[in-house]
Amino acid sequence: MGQFDGQVVYITGIARGQGRNHAVRFAAEGASIIGLDIADRVADHQTYPTATADDLAETVRLVEEAGGKILARQGDTRDLAVQQQLVADGIEAFGRLDHVVANAGILTWGLTWELTEAQFTDVVDVNLVGTWKTLKAVIPPMIEARNGGSITIISSTAGLKAMPAQASYSASKFGLRGLAQSAAKELGPKRIRVNTVHPYAVNTPMGVEDPEAFKAFETYGEHFPSMMNHYPVATLDDLSDAVLYLATAQAVTGAEFQIDMGSSKV
């Protein structure tokens, strides 16, 4: 018996990294998965490896290997119609929707006044506007079903403590906090809980394979320390532990859950 037997989870950014790990962990606990990922390069200014269609196919394989059912599709969170159709198809296939993990996001680097217009708007459009479109796609059917449930939005420590060379990313992640807080207050009477998770460095291509990040650390290193030098990078399971907990924590909403080795407090 799994703690999510018979339940359904919608996850964006599912092709690899955190999204994939969340999907596999939920599936191992009995959930069916609806998944979305663009599985392609989002913007020319990305400086870390991007997910591919093969990555998405591997997520499907791993979820099924864990015993879960999955409906996964390539698509952009910025396309509301794509998300609405996928959610509708997932509910038709699996019968319900219980939990949402709004995980999709991108990162670019540059000083506030040196960012190109695309570097700023692409990041805000994917991270903030795309997440709002995720909520717009999932909340009406969740309300209609009257099953309660949870929505977990993946923000960042950069949404708690703005970081240098990350103006667009920090702005988008701070925005997610406001979006989540509004939704939590609106959805409390509907028994739908909304929380944010705030990672620091995580063992993903975005987290550890971006050469521009190391340049920023060299110049602005005093802004990037944590309290745990012996544990510099969180594992995928560190993040999934938090996400699965928030999906079950009936008394928790409006929370800002830090998985950051204390970096937001330094």
Image (cartoon, grey):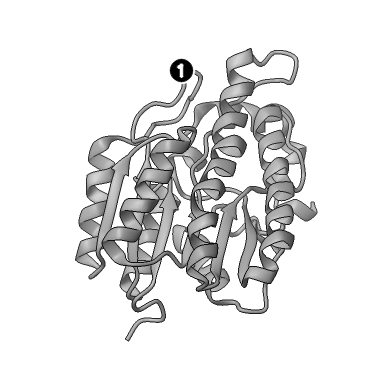
Residue at image position (51%, 19%) is: 45
* Location of residue 112 in the rendering, given as x and y in whole percent from the top left corner: 74, 20
> Dot 1 surroundings within 10 Å: few (below 14), some, or many (20 or more)?
few
* Location of residue 161 in the rendering, given as x and y in whole percent from the top left corner: 77, 45
* Location of residue 61 in the rendering, given as x and y in whole percent from the top left corner: 20, 55
Against 98, residue 207 (above or below) is above
* Location of residue 86 in the rendering, given as x and y in whole percent from the top left corner: 35, 47
Quarter location, residue 97: bottom left
Q: Quadrant of the N terminus?
A: bottom left
Residue labelled with disc 1: 44
Whether residue 168 sits left or right of residue 41 in the image: it is right
Q: Is residue 225 visible?
A: no
Residue at image position (69%, 70%) is: 189
Camera-side residue of 4 and 190: 190
Residue at image position (73%, 53%) is: 182
Residue at image position (62%, 48%) is: 155
Q: Which amino acid is tagged 1?
A: Asp
